[in-house]
Image (spheres, rainbow, N blue to C red):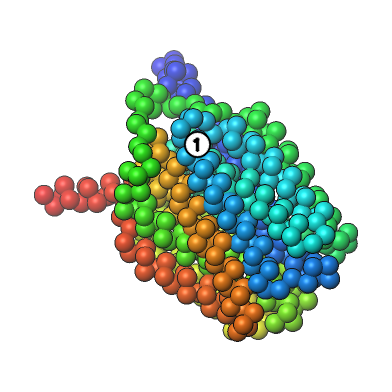
Amino acid sequence: MTDTKTSTRSPGAVADREAKRYENRLLLILFLAFGFVFFDRQALAFLAPYMDKDFGLSNGQLGTLSGVLALTWAVAGMFAGRLSDKLGRRKPILIGAVVLFSVFSSASGLMAGFGGLLAARALMGTAEGAVLPMAQSLMVEASRESRRGLNMGLLQGSSAGLLGGIVAPVVVVWFAENHGWQTAFYVTIVPGLVIAALIAKLVREKPPAPAAAAAAPALPKPALKDVLKLRNVLVCMLIACFYLTWFVTLITFTPTYLTDVKGFAPGTMSGVMTCLGVAWVLWGFATPAISDRIGRKPALIGFTTLAVFCPLSVVFVSSPTLLGVLMVLTYTGLGCFTLFMATIPAETVPAGALATALGVIMGVGELAGGFLGPMISGWASDLWGLQTAMFIAAGSAAIVVVLSFSLRETAPAVLRRRAAAVQGAA
């Protein structure tokens, strides 16, 4: 009895418990932080039908508003990731980014013309771009190997799905219906400021180390050119370009497609979009958790194949109920985002280059898929109809399936099983 009590109170056991508690606390705070990034980012798509009387936005302009945010998001993400690795600091950059994106999101409600709205969205993207590389870098450093995929999936996928996909359409549409679209933008500043305060108070620059890792040596910080030579990094960059096209095009034009082309009432549109949010939350943690067991590569291939059918369902399914069910079953791509944008790179590059790799992959993907993708889709839709955007989204997901076969597996459990099988065969 005495030995048991002594062992549970040993410095190693205490360190392990503290590391686990901090891991869970950090996950909750970063879950809220990145979730509200997408709450703010998604607000424009849900408010677009209400803004038509004041702005008369064309499909091309709507795509441009989405694209300019992605452009500044991309540049900021690459810059912030590299700066963070050079300074060895994450927390101050994250706090500043959360405060600024909340302020700029709220400022969108003050704009009276397309140019002002474009400027507000550009500034908002500049702040938001730094959040994901900082958040995922902090989360990787605090995560146990057995929870790495799940934690990163909850942070990046489920958080965005819950707050950006479920809460946002309900709250934003309610405010727009009852208080005007401007007020819907104004209220976005409140949660951001609260979250920034929580980060300042509760997040550490370096997580408490479990006993086994307490004496781990410091790792070197590779140059950017060395990071870009890694096969998985290059493949993930290409995947990001097409997967961002799938996501941003789908989420930007689906609300307008449902109201203008299919004739759904705003409440019905909001309900269907909420189904996307349910799927986002579900697959956001399920996909990376499954990948912990079956491998990153097969999970990415299988779930992306399902994602091809999501935009096609928007075009070919008329029943709102059936469409909502299909959205839940096929909106699997956001669970895959964590794999190619965070987990696979984190298991590929040295820790000293982690934020750099995450920032570059996210940045290149946002430039090609987030910036150019929706603008091209918007212009094409003005020429050939809004269904064109959905076909572009489906084709982009199909290309990701092909690219995923070029990845090298990184899941630790899978690699250990392979090594054991090789030893057993020998």
Residue 40 in the image: x percent, y percent?
69, 53
- Residue at x 62% of width, y 73% of height: 378
Residue 129 in the image: x percent, y percent?
58, 48
Residue 290 in the image: x percent, y percent?
43, 56
Q: Amino acid at mark 1?
A: Leu
Residue 59 in the image: x percent, y percent?
67, 73
- Residue at x 68% of width, y 36% of height: 196
Looking at the image, residue 124 sits to the left or right of residue 233; the answer is: right
Q: Residue furthest front?
A: 115
Looking at the image, residue 227 sits to the left or right of residue 83; the answer is: left
- Residue at x 40% of width, y 56% of height: 236
Residue in the foreground of this view, choosing between 69 and 186: 69
Label count reads: 1
Q: Secondary structure at mark 1?
A: helix
Q: Is residue 156 visible?
A: no
Task: Read off the residue under disc 1.
Answer: 83
Say above or below: 56 vs 194. Answer: below
Quarter assignment of residue 134: top right
The image quadrant where one finds the N terminus is top left
Residue in the foreground of this view, choosing between 157 and 91: 91
- Residue at x 56% of width, y 28% of height: 204
